[in-house]
Image: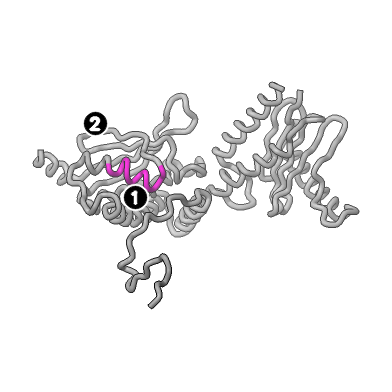
Amino acid sequence: MIGTGKIKQYANVLDKPLGKGKQEVSLSAFAFLFSELVQYNQTQVDNISELETRLEDAGYAVGARVLELLCHRDKGNRRETRLLGILSFVHSTVWKVLFGKVADSLEKGTEHEDEYMISEKELLVNRFISIPKDMGTFHCGAFVAGIVKGVLENVGFPAVVTAHFVPVEGQQRPRTTILIKFAEEVLRREARLG
Amino acid sequence: MAAIYSLYIINKSGGLIFYKDYGSKGRMDTNDSLRVASLWHSMHAISQQLSPINGCSGIELLEADTFDLHCFQSLTGTKFFVVCETGTQHMEALLKVIYELYTDYVLKNPFYEMEMPIRCELFDINLTQVVQKDRVALLGR
């Protein structure tokens, strides 16, 4: 039979190689979609913490899938087993794939052993969002916190992840910090591994 | 020196959703600014009907003795107009930039209800920056 041209036809769609995917997506399209996600969830909940939980759950689903994809594409089906390894994976690889740049900084918490912080001057998802004064401490970065949580939990490092605004002197807009608090077992395992 | 006196944004039904005055002249209290907005909305609509040219999109420039009024209407009917000193240059370009800021920081904000008054911090911050830059550029000339 004469060849079907340059593209190799696969009998089963599951055999097709996982492509690199589109490197660039319209920021405006994402901003509108995210805005609609927030608005939709606002109609379904009674208070702010529920809204944050919902956004976090949405992010969790994204995190779980991104982890699988990245492990297959970039890491050759290997996954990190050490704390610092997984944190730098999230801070660099995951951020690069999702937001086009690595996160601004990764710090260890000074007060507690189990706390780590990823900071950003301004999260991409928050670029066009102004929180009204009456919403208090609500942070749309709960979505990104959910993504980090999804990645960490599915890799074996259960944690509680939250997003916070941290005011900075000299700047009108506060920085955003994603606070990661690891579960007990993670620290015990880490100590055991030495 | 060329200067902007005030900026108005009105929604498609003629209600004022944003008003900012920049100081020197033409300050108005809330009621007056609302009146000017609905007045302009009606005049704009009437001018579209009166125009001898087919397909007229309404008044774009009003020149008076003591001020100029530049108006920009988006495809959706939202009008941006600025009252400025006579002879100020590049107001159309400024209005287009403000329209872009509106689409970015107001329309992509999930907490903004359509056609309601604009209360978005980011919009205010960026607007101030743009007008400041414009002023500096004008003064530098």
State the residue position of label 1.
A146
Q: Which residues are magenta?
A: A89-100
Q: Residues within 10 Å of mark 1 (few under 14, many from 20)?
A: many
Left or right of B77? Residue A100 is: left
Quadrant that contains the C terminus of chain A = top left
Q: Position of residue A44 (x, y in %)?
A: 44, 59
From the viewer's side, name the closer residue of A20 and A104: A20
State the residue position of label 2.
A111
Q: Say if residue B38 shows up in the picture.
A: yes
Q: Residues within 10 Å of mark 2 (few under 14, many from 20)?
A: few
Residue in the picture at 76% in, 39% down: B32
Residue in the picture at 45% in, 46% down: A125
Q: Secondary structure at mark 2?
A: loop
Quarter of the image for residue B5 reads top right
Residue in the picture at 68% in, 39% down: B19
Earlier in the chain: of badge 2 and badge 1, it is 2
Q: Main secondary structure of the magenta part?
A: helix
Q: Position of residue A159 (x, y in %)?
A: 24, 46
